[in-house]
Image (cartoon, rainbow, N blue to C red):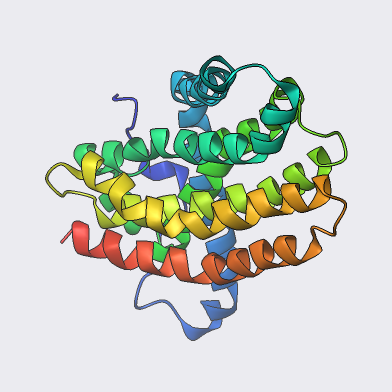
């Protein structure tokens, strides 16, 4: 069976149209079970293709390590620009696994079965985004602390940096899943994807780096963190809906 193959018995089947009305209250439970099954499948595939996560993590570390070689090892210079370095490298590293997010399932037909499992397309996209964050965003978040110390960031700014990366990487995964669904099946989709996503990710980069800069200068990072939380609150319902619509259009 191909690596991205999908077993239809892994998910509960959708209720038949002729099912009695008495079974309607069990629909939310069925959606919960389907969502958990899709998320579990994606996590198992990410473990099977662990090289994708490792590549994103190594890119994050190596790209950040190039900056001291280019601008010099002066602690004051590195400490001042360290938040921007960490955020730019995290944003670019989060883009690396996106071409496989829906592409492998689209090529082998698993995406059609996912959309027929009884789960709305928006929740399928949300499960994919959650799996992307757990397999890519969370490792980047864990590696950001030691990387910030390596770049001589002020110790008082590191907690603000990590506090901004938590909602920020979630937004990056949601935007990434939406972008990957939109370019699904397009010619040269791998080229279009970063061109589509980088402008949308720029506000996350600005507010995340500003939160760490504010903490380093002794001011409160709370306004910037609240703006990141507002972006997450907006992306959480909108991105899966847009991705679900794009998925339905791609499989027609």
Q: Give left or right: position of 15 versus 140.
A: left
> In terms of depth relative to the viewer, which is nearer, 22 or 118?
118
Q: Give how far across and how far down residue 148 sits, in percent.
A: 72, 29
Q: Give how far across and how far down residue 186 sits, in percent.
A: 15, 49
Q: Give how far across and how far down residue 184 sits, in percent.
A: 23, 50
Q: Give left or right: position of 210 versus 16.
A: right
> In terms of depth relative to the viewer, which is nearer, 221 or 79?
79
Q: Quadrant of residue 92?
A: top left
Q: Give how far across and how far down residue 141 sits, in percent.
A: 67, 36
Q: Which quadrant of the rendered structure holds the C terminus?
A: bottom left
- For the point 68% across and 29% down, the residue is 77
Position above or below: 52 against 220: above
Position above or below: 19 against 8: below
Q: How many marks?
A: 0
Q: Quadrant of residue 159?
A: top right
Farthest left residue?
Answer: 187
Q: Give left or right: position of 12 versus 169.
A: left
Q: Which quadrant of the rendered structure holds the N terminus?
A: top left
| Res 120 visible | no
- For the point 71% across and 62% down, the residue is 224
- For the point 53% across and 63% down, the residue is 31
């Amino acid at each position: 069976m191909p690596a991205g193959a999908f077993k239809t018995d892994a998910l509960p089947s959708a209720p038949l149209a002729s099912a009695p009305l008495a079974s309607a209250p069990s629909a939310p439970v069925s959606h919960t079970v389907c969502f958990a099954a899709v998320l579990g499948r994606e996590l198992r595939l990410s473990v099977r293709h662990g090289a994708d996560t490792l590549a994103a993590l190594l890119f994050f570390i190596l790209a950040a390590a190039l900056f001291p070689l280019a601008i010099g090892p002066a602690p004051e210079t590195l400490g001042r620009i360290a938040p921007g370095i960490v955020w730019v490298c995290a944003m670019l590293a989060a883009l690396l696994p996106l071409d496989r997010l829906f592409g492998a399932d689209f090529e082998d037909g698993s995406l059609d079965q996912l959309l027929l499992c009884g789960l709305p397309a928006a929740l399928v996209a949300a499960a994919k985004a959650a799996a992307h964050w757990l397999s890519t965003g969370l490792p980047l978040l864990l590696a950001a602390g030691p990387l910030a110390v390596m770049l001589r960031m002020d110790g008082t700014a590191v907690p603000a940096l990590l506090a901004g990366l938590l909602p920020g990487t979630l937004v990056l995964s949601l935007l990434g899943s939406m972008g990957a669904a939109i370019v699904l099946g397009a010619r040269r989709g791998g080229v279009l994807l970063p061109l589509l996503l980088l402008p949308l990710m720029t506000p996350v980069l600005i507010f995340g780096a500003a939160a760490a800069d504010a903490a380093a200068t002794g001011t409160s990072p709370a306004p910037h963190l609240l703006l990141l939380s507002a972006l997450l609150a907006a992306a959480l319902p909108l991105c899966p809906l847009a991705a679900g619509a794009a998925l339905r259009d791609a499989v027609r």
